[in-house]
Image (cartoon, helix red, strand yellow):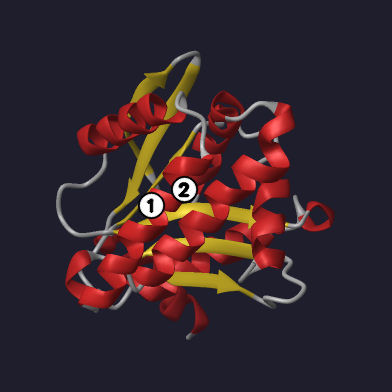
């Protein structure tokens, strides 16, 4: 499997994620949940997204980041390949996943930016490095991707404790919705805030 070490890192990082636990039973984790994560990486690649990691062979972190639509360069062939990958995944996943995924997309459409934006699909950090600022540095790397342009950054989380962490990093809660017993929180960081932060850093270094 291409990107297998990254897939395994993200699978380990999301093992206790409320959204993934809603979708997958414990006995499905090593097959169906990892197939979903592998698909998300492949989809991002076909849609000209960015995979942030330090070492694909032995990664200590990984982030899947979708680019704003105007910045994507997607060939017709890659669009067709994506359709094939979606059909292959659909065969592998339990039927109960589709309604959950549809509700997830409805909440996103209600609360994430309608204008083009960077979207952080997943961020994972190796267990031995959690709590050591690695996740913050990954988000700063996404800031660097977006800071020179007019596009905001968006993400969602199903871990309530993450909301305050993202707030401290400049994100604003734009809305929430229910996925069964799980609450989904949508957050956005506007481009003006990123530019102001970068200017503040420059002033502080003078």
Mark 1: give few (<14), some (14-19) or many (20+) Cα within 10 Å: some
Within the image, what quadrant is residue 103 found in?
top left
Report which quarter residue 31 is drawn in.
top right
| Quadrant into which the N terminus falls | bottom right
Taking depth in this image into account, of 135 and 83 the one nearest to the observer is 83
- Looking at the picture, how far across and down is residue 34, in whole percent? 63, 49
Residue position for label 1: 86
Relative to the observer, which residue lies in front, 48 or 24?
A: 24
Callout 2 touching callout 1 (CB < 8 Å)? yes
- Identify the residue shown where x is 29% and y is 37%: 108
Q: Residue at x 43, y 42 (%)?
A: 90
Can you tell which mark lies on residue 89? 2
Position of 7 with respect to 117 (left or right) is right
- Say above or below: 198 vs 193: below
- Mark 2 and mark 1: span between their CA atoms? 5 Å
**Residue 43: percent from left, percent from top:** 40, 61
Q: Mark 2 falls on what kind of element?
A: helix
């Amino acid at each position: 499997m291409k990107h297998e070490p990254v897939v395994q890192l993200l699978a380990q990082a999301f093992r206790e994620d409320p959204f993934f636990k809603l979708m997958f039973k414990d006995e499905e984790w090593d097959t169906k949940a990892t197939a979903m994560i592998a698909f998300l990486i492949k989809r991002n690649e076909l849609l000209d997204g960015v995979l942030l990691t330090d070492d694909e062979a032995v990664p200590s972190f990984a982030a899947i980041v979708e680019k704003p639509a105007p910045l994507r360069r997607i060939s017709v062939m890659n669009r067709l390949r994506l359709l094939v990958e979606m059909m292959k995944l659909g065969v592998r996943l339990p039927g109960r996943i589709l309604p959950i995924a549809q509700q997830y997309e409805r909440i996103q459409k209600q609360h994430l930016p309608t204008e083009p934006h960077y979207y952080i699909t997943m961020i994972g950090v190796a267990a031995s490095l959690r709590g050591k600022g690695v996740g913050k540095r990954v988000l700063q790397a996404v800031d660097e991707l977006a800071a020179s342009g007019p596009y905001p950054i968006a993400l969602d989380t199903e871990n309530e404790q993450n909301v305050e962490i993202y707030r401290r990093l400049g994100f604003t809660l734009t809305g929430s919705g229910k996925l069964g017993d799980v609450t989904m929180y949508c957050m956005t960081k506007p481009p003006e805030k990123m530019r102001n932060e970068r200017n503040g850093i420059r002033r502080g270094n003078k």
